[in-house]
Image (cartoon, helix red, strand yellow):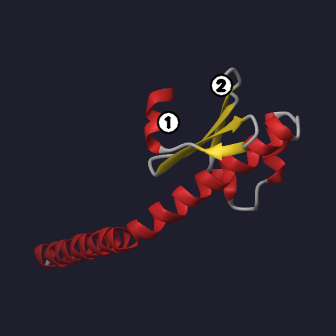
Amino acid sequence: MATRNISAMQGAGGRLKWIVLALAVILVAVLAWLWPSLRAYSQTGAAYSARVVCSCRYIGGRELGDCEKDLEPGMEVVSLSEAAEERRIDATVPLMASESAEFREGWGCVLMTPKEREAAR
């Protein structure tokens, strides 16, 4: 009788492993399907944040911490840093995207191209 109960419990545990495996496969598939959209939203959010905070900081003359208040709700995931000597703001969405905006006399704050960002680092 005891072996029968043990095998019944092992059967339930085996089913649980398959359920967990199936859920993991579904989660990976959904993430793979959504990845291009998530990456595009991250890139847009980083560019928006860099541009807005650069304008606030170098045109408006406000402090970086104060400029973060100007961002739309939901932008909390974007990390901001300042390169004061270059008059540049770097915005990063961890593991997804990064953008930079720099103040250029006569032009205001301009998003940097990937080549410019690479040369600046």
The residue shown at (66%, 55%) is: 48
x then y, percent, for residue 50: 66, 46
Task: Give me the disc on residue 101.
Answer: none
Which quadrant of the figure has residue 89? top right
Report crowding for label 2: few under 14, some 14 to 19, many 20 or more residues within 10 A (C-alpha).
few
* 95 or 11, nearer to the observer: 95
The residue shown at (71%, 43%) is: 109
Q: Quadrant of the N terminus?
A: bottom left
Q: Earlier in the sequence, mark 1 or mark 2?
A: 2
For residue 85, side relative to residue 11 (left or right): right
Rendered view: 6 above or below 76: below
Rendered view: 84 above or below 41: above
Q: CA distance from mark 1 to mark 2?
A: 12 Å
For residue 13, side relative to residue 84 (left or right): left
x then y, percent, for residue 84: 71, 24
In terms of secondary structure, where does tag 1 sit? helix
x then y, percent, for residue 110: 65, 45
* 119 or 81, nearer to the observer: 119
CB contact under 8 Å: marks 1 and 2 = no
In terms of secondary structure, where does tag 2 sit? loop
How many numbered circles does the render carry?
2
Report crowding for label 1: few under 14, some 14 to 19, many 20 or more residues within 10 A (C-alpha).
some
For residue 9, side relative to residue 44 (left or right): left
Amino acid type assigned to the residue bearing label 1 in the image: Arg
Amino acid type assigned to the residue bearing label 2 in the image: Glu
- Label 1, on which residue? 117
x then y, percent, for residue 44: 57, 60
* 97 or 87, nearer to the observer: 87
The residue shown at (52%, 56%) is: 43
The residue shown at (49%, 36%) is: 116
Rendered view: 77 above or below 11: above
- Label 2, on which residue? 86
